[in-house]
Amino acid sequence: MKVEQIFTCHQVGEERKVSLATLAFQGQAMYWWTTLVRERRLHNDPPIEYWNDLRSAMRRRHIPSYYSRELMDKLQRLQQENMSVEEYRKKMELYLMRAGIREEERLTIARFLSGLNFDIRDRVELLPYRDLDDLVQLCIRVEQQHLRKNSFKKDKTHSSSYVKKDYKREGQFSKYDSSKNFGKG
């Protein structure tokens, strides 16, 4: 989150994070915050003093309960299809980040490979790689190779398209060739 980057950049202590974050609230967010503070006082609940507690309260309020289930489902069904390798990787990383999933790299690699298009997956599974970044670079190279081959095939089919020529034996004239049919009336 951007606010966490600001906290880190300005070395904001834990005791000041909640007050600084809520200072930026406006409109509906400010109404929600003041209502939450008032309700906590009425129920004799302790005030929210820590950033993680505020972040959890904001998530409960603004993110529906089914959101993480839908996100996990999207992540499980993610396939490269017509995306580039880089677009596919970014989408997978976005889903992982939004779902709050931190998994071992070997599991992320398996997840990445399982969603790749077959023509790329079949090639890179045979090649050595050290980590996910290395694997992605190999996939991009294979993808570029496929694009070059496909563009070469298209160029080749356009340049060598078959043109049927009307060859005639010597002495034969086409009935449509009026310049050669000078003897007929």
Image (cartoon, grey):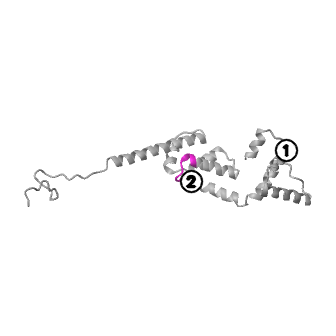
**180 is higher (above) or lower (below) than 13:** below
Query: Is residue 85 part of the magenta span, yes or no?
Result: yes
Residue 148 occupies quadrant: top left
Measured as percent of width and height from the top left, residue 19 is found at: 84, 48
Q: Amino acid at mark 1?
A: Arg
Frontmost residue, 65 versus 49: 49
Which residue corresponds to the image point at 52% horizontal and 47% vertical from the top-left? 121
Q: Which region of the structure is painted magenta?
A: 79-87
Query: Is residue 137 part of the magenta span, yes or no?
Result: no
- Most frequent secondary structure within the magenta stretch: loop
Q: Which residue is mark 1?
A: 16
Q: Earlier in the sequence, mark 2 or mark 1?
A: 1
Measured as percent of width and height from the top left, residue 20 is found at: 82, 46
Q: Amino acid at mark 2?
A: Gln
Mark 2 vs mark 1: give the one in front: 1
Q: Which residue is mark 2?
A: 79
**Spatial distance from mark 2 to mark 1, Cα to Cα?**
43 Å
Q: Please indicate whether residue 50 sits to the left or right of residue 3 in the image.
A: right
